[in-house]
């Protein structure tokens, strides 16, 4: 409220009050548009080079001349219950764009949205049917015999399984981002606590729905921080509604969050029972298509990125793997931020991406390139 | 979050709500965060979900059965038929993928 020079209260005029309400009405319209419409995300040009069932492999159009590019191509593998667009959120704030500018030959595996007919897909299929074929195609297109792989969340789990089972496929560098691998501490996260309760039966969910609905997975993730996710995000938007840079960023992120996809029923059941409840990967008892997954066979250079404020995959779920892998060249890297924020948040281009590039660039030259 | 130190303006239509929110939300978020991370919450949501799924299962089965019957009477494929077809198509895709890879290898050798 305004005050005059001698400290007296100056009541707003009728016109000023009307203007204030008009401003609120305009902001409400903007708010409604941002919450209920989709922004243009994943805009970086790419070419579809391979498909299998719902999975697609893309190659991003390089922006750096071939002679200046790194010799070792990089494959991005995101989780199976979200779209991978978060890696290429919006022009000017995209990890894909950043890595292309740094001279990487970049490939993206999009697992696609499973239909009811895909309810029997398991981690076995993702790690030993799809991923080896993707790698074969990538090598054929790039002409390189070696490659790097970046796995995020459940994508990191699949990459870890694959890297342990197929150490001779040419994987030189493995980057794990917020990788849920070690479930020994049942109280470490909301998910661990919820799924370890005997009354939680993934079989019943799968029997009822076939695939686990995207909305159900989304609600589960949001319930880990209910006030922040159901209220805080919208109050933050309202507070910044007149700041185009903040609203553009919020709109892009909300578009990605809203675009939920189901998770294949068998994979979900396997995730809860064999990983969350029985911790088979770390216990050394995991078998994928009858093959024993031995982490000591993972020998690629390893960069394991931990989000310190991650409430979905708490640091303890990712750290334990460092002592079990066979890699000689391995590094644990902590970043301040949350599960998604470390890669897609406002500070990602300063606190995360340059470190990934720095680590990978020195390991991405072909032998003999000097 | 907005700047809670802003001077309170009663003529700002959203000012009052904002003040209330800023003073309570952090505490509320902390309380809810702690609540959902308790064993009691895990047990109660697990039981509720289980009860809902178990009680709706008989109805779901009746629906599925009558739907399959209706589709069969209309000579239309059921979900199982489509799933089987998808499996066969995926197998064919995999064989084509293998052939494609062999062709790539062959072409790279004769170049």
Image: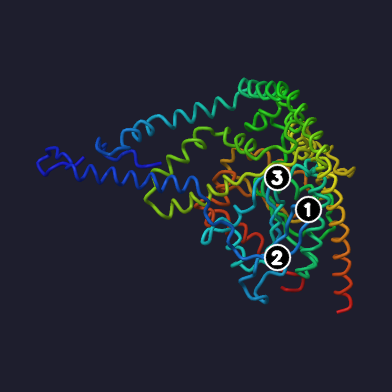
Q: Residue sitting at 56 percent across and 41 percent down?
A: A309
Q: 10 Å neighbourhood of mark 2: few (<14), some, or many (≥20)?
A: many
Q: State the SS at label 3.
A: helix
Asked if A45 appears above or below B44 in the picture, the reply is: below
For disc 1, the chain is: A
Q: Alpha-carbon distance for marks 2 and 3?
A: 24 Å
In the rendered image, the vertical position of residue A107 relative to residue A235, given as above or below: below
Tell me the SS state at disc 1: loop
Residue A337 picture location, percent across and down:
54, 45
Among the two numbered marks 1 and 3 on one chain, the one whose residue lies closer to the N terminus: 1
First in sequence: mark 1 vs mark 2: 1
Q: Residue at x 72, y 53 (%)?
A: A302
The local crowd at label 3, few if under 14, some if 14 to 19, many if 20 or more residues have their Cα within 10 Å, is many
Q: Position of residue A200 (x, y in %)?
A: 71, 26
**Residue annotated with mark 1:** A53
Residue nearest the observer in this picture, A281 or A321:
A281
Where does label 3 land, which residue? A154
Question: Are the two marked residues, 1 and 3, in contact with CB atoms closer than 8 angstroms?
Answer: no
C-alpha separation, residue under disc 1 versus residue under disc 2: 31 Å
Q: Report the residue marked by disc 2.
A: A364
> Position of A296 compared to B33: left or right?
right
Whether residues under marks 1 and 2 lie with C-beta atoms below 8 angstroms apart, the answer is: no
Quarter holding residue A120:
top right
Under circle 2, the secondary element is loop
The residue at 65%/22% (across/down) is B48
Alpha carbon distance from label 1 to label 3: 19 Å
């Amino acid at each position: 409220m305004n005050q005059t020079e001698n400290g007296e209260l100056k009541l707003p005029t009728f016109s000023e009050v009307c203007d204030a309400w008009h401003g609120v009405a305009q902001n409400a319209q903007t708010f409604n548009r941002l919450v209920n419409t989709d922004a243009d995300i994943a805009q970086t040009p790419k070419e579809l080079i391979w498909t299998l069932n719902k999975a697609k492999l893309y190659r991003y159009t390089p922006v750096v001349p071939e002679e200046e590019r790194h010799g070792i191509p990089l494959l991005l593998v995101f989780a199976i219950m979200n779209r991978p667009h978060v890696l290429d959120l919006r022009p000017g704030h995209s990890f894909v764009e950043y890595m292309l500018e740094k001279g990487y030959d970049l490939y993206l595996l999009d697992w696609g949205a499973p239909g009811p007919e895909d309810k029997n897909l398991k981690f076995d299929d993702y790690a030993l049917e799809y991923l080896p074929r993707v790698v074969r195609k990538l090598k054929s297109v790039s002409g390189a015999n070696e490659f790097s792989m970046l796995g995020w969340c459940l994508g990191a789990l699949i990459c870890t399984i694959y890297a342990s089972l197929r150490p001779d496929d040419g994987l030189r560098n493995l980057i794990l981002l917020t990788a849920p691998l070690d479930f020994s501490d049942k109280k470490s996260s909301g998910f661990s606590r919820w799924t370890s309760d005997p009354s939680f039966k993934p079989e019943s969910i799968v029997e009822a729905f076939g695939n686990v609905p995207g909305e159900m997975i989304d609600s589960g993730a949001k319930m880990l921080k209910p006030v922040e996710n159901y209220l805080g995000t919208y109050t933050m938007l309202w507070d910044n509604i007149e700041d185009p840079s903040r609203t553009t960023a919020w709109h892009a992120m909300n578009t990605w969050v809203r675009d939920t996809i189901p998770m294949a029923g068998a994979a979900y059941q396997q995730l809860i029972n064999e990983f969350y409840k029985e911790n088979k990967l770390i216990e050394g008892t995991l078998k994928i298509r009858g093959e024993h997954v031995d982490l000591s066979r993972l020998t690629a250079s390893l960069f394991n990125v931990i989000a310190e404020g991650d409430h979905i995959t708490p640091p303890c779920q990712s750290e334990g793997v460092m002592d079990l892998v066979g890699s000689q060249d391995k590094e644990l890297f902590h970043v301040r931020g949350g599960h998604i924020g470390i890669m897609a948040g406002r500070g990602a281009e300063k606190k995360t991406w340059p470190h990934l590039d720095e680590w990978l660039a020195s390991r991405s030259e072909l032998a003999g390139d000097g | 979050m907005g700047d809670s130190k802003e001077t309170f303006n009663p003529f700002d239509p959203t000012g009052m709500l904002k003040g209330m929110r800023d003073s309570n939300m952090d505490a509320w978020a902390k309380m809810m965060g702690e609540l959902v991370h308790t064993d009691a919450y895990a047990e109660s949501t697990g039981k509720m979900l289980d009860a809902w799924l178990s009680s709706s299962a008989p109805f779901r089965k009746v629906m599925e059965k009558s739907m399959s019957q209706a589709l069969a009477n209309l000579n239309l494929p059921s979900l199982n038929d489509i799933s089987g077809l998808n499996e066969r198509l995926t197998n064919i895709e995999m064989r084509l993928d293998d052939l494609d890879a062999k062709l790539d290898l062959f072409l790279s050798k004769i170049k």
